Image (cartoon, rainbow, N blue to C red):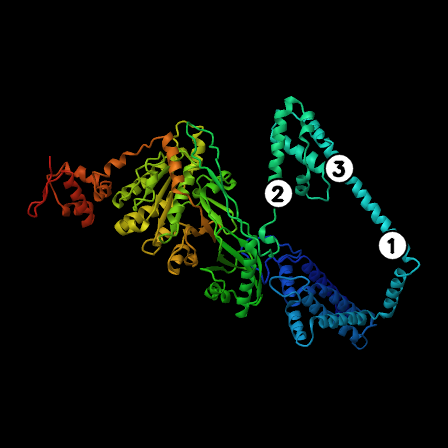
Amino acid sequence: MNYNWADYLYMVVKKYGIIALLSCVDLFLLGSLVTFNPTDQSWFYHTTKAQVFHNIFGMLGSYTASLMIYFFGSASLVFPLFLMYAIIFYYGMQVTKKMSIATEWDRMLGVATAFASCLVLCQIHAVVSYDFTYPGGMLGNYISKKIVWYFDPLTQAIIVWSLLVSSLILITRCSYIPALQSMYACVVYICDPEKLPARIMLYVIQMIGAVCSYALQCLKKIYEIFSGAIVQRIDTSIVEFEYEKNIDQDIDTIVHDLFWDEYIGHGQQKKDTIQGVALDQNAASKAFNQDLHVHTMQLEEAMVAKNIEFQREHQETLFDLPLQAPAKEKIIEKKVVERPVAPEAKKDGYTMPFLPSKKVEQKAMVAQQEMLAMQAKLLEQKLEQFDIKGTVVAMHAGPVVILFEYQPDIKVKVSRILSLEDDLAMALKALSIRIIAPIPGRSVVGFEVANAHRQDVLFSTILDSPEFKKHTGSLPMIYGQDTLGNNIVADLAKMPHLLIAGSTGSGKSVALNAMLVSLLCSLRPDQLKLIIIDPKRLEFAAYDGIAHLIFPIVTETKKAIPVLKWVVQTMEERYKVMASFGVRNLGDYQAAAKSNKDMEPMPFIVVIIDELADLMMTAGKAVEDSIARLAQMARAAGIHMIIATQRPSVDVITGMIKVNFPNRVAFKVTSKIDSRTILDASGAEKLLGRGDMLFLDASKSNLVRVHGAYVSDAEIHAVVAQIKAQQKVQYLDLFEQFSNNSEDELLDADDELYQEVLTLLKDLDEVSISMLQRRFRIGYNRSARIISILESKGLIMSIEGGKTRRVVR
């Protein structure tokens, strides 16, 4: 009995279980292939971000579909159909017993031939292409390469299509003669001499009717336009509105709902139609009443502004157009149009400084397009000489560099492209070339080449841009423009510190001035306080005397140490105050201070050090400890640092300093070692200078090439003059100690043992270095410095023949 049940179960599984399993596999493959998305994680695309799979079968479907597409390409979509035939064939063999290999061998041969034909056809015609494989997959590419040696492209297509049709005839076992007879009958019917003229006349009548109907609609719209119907409709709608509401919202409703939706056809673009519409001003003035005259003017201005804005939003980018242009076109010279920017409203009697905006018109790139196309072609040819095949898929012209996006072949290794940097620079006749392999998040390699028609990036232009005006950060700083021409404005409060390095003449000081002026144009003196340490004495001399300064500009190294100690002490005091009020950072403290009068306002403090190398050479340990402590703890207290140096070596930018400055900027440096020191990556040695920089943003963890904004001395003096005219500077008393005390006195007078030593002297008549060492368990150097300070202040006598020092009463 047991044997019979087992035999019956085996028979059922053999007949129906395998069929059900194969059917499920077929449905799985079909669903996986149809819903495949190249951005899903698979064998050929990896990402560390958590994502939702687009594939209907999730990760398993994505991995399976990517593997099939890799081998079969676009032809993998027909694979489930052939698998379905295999299921039917197996059903006929096991269940109905009507099919066998001996009778169906021709169909199996047809299936194999049809699938191979699909592979080659997908490869020849490039039906759908993926980044990680060929259109016909690896198998289709292999077969097509073998055919290329024997036949030309037309013959290949004819042979493969014939094989596909013959295979389908074998599979279906349908004769093609009835199909040819049907086609012949259709041709005879269409070309019948008796019926052909009647059909042609019917088509002509239908075409004339459609044209006349469309012409009548156009004439009706033109009549309404020139008869003032539009103005009357707008007039009626304006009367219905309540003018106590926001006029901008009313104008938006009128322009969109009444003008575009009602009077412009659905098949035309809005910007083309609105340019051809000319409102009759006389009809408008008659239609409107005098009490609505003000709103009429606002309506016209809003419509013009919307027209300009609409054109800008829908303007095609330069490199979306074909790279062909007449050779006789010349580049239009740039024109600078100055437009004064209205200052912001006064608050507490203080007006924000402003600068006249200089709008630089972009140069027409018509004549340059041919040169760019030639460079792109030359780049492809040069790479092909080194057995690297691919195409330039896009070009982006920035103010200083041009970015070529190159998509290499699937078999090309990125390391091979990186090794050809110098050869490509020579081939393109470029000063330098920087390779981004690959561009983050994309399957292309970027080639940054210097633009032969370099344009200036003006500070005043970015200052008047929406990116700066609408920036929501607490400490907005202007950097410049990226390779695509986008304005770059970053928030120092989120960094929270910035480290800058670059050789002499690379534009480092100009960038510091642009950042400082952008802060001065954004925050009042009661919101921002500055400490400037400038050992070079010249770069920041223009800012001396502005109300934002806490101390005069520090130009001597020995005076910088107590200033940094004062900043550390201020940080600790702020933390104590914030802890007493139960707040965690300066932002929460400022928000609570608006409603609590007992809380004194705390402004942001920005410490700017222009040359760190000079400070590290004279007082390395003291400066490094203060900077490291501020970098670790000062963020929540609203204290931020901007440190610049010409020499980014490891003895200047130590590990303690570097680890606490995640955001860094590198201008042109002399070697790859310096580039790796500041950025942990090479590339800064290939920059062009004059403000060309690489910005390492910790929030994005990738390098961004930025062309620094240029701020002139006249603009700096204009901003400083506006600040000085409104408020006078009030320095702290710490400055009075600079001229009377030396570095050691200022350093050791704050020693925690100094007060204890003064208390001890009240009970002693004599004191010595060794006695302080034994009493306080300190070293010789520290004890000797304390004795020197006591002697300089006249508290003890000078040494006499090796005896102990007497205490002065």
Amino acid under disc 3: Lys
Labels 3 & 1 near each other (Cβ < 8 A): no
First in sequence: mark 1 vs mark 2: 1
Snapshot quadrant of residue 86: bottom right
CA distance for labels 3 and 2? 23 Å
Amino acid under disc 1: Ile
Identify the element where label 1 is drawn: helix
How far across and how far down the image is residue 420, in percent? Answer: 48, 66
How far across and how far down the image is residue 515, in percent? Answer: 41, 43
Front residue of 187 and 281: 281
Q: Quadrant of the C terminus?
A: top left
Front residue of 221 and 802: 221
Residue 701 visible from this viewpoint: no
Identify the element where label 2 is drawn: helix
Residue 221, labelled with which disc? Answer: 3
First in sequence: mark 3 vs mark 2: 3
The residue singled out by tag 2 in the image is 311
Residue 626 visible from this viewpoint: yes
Labels 1 & 2 near each other (Cβ < 8 A): no
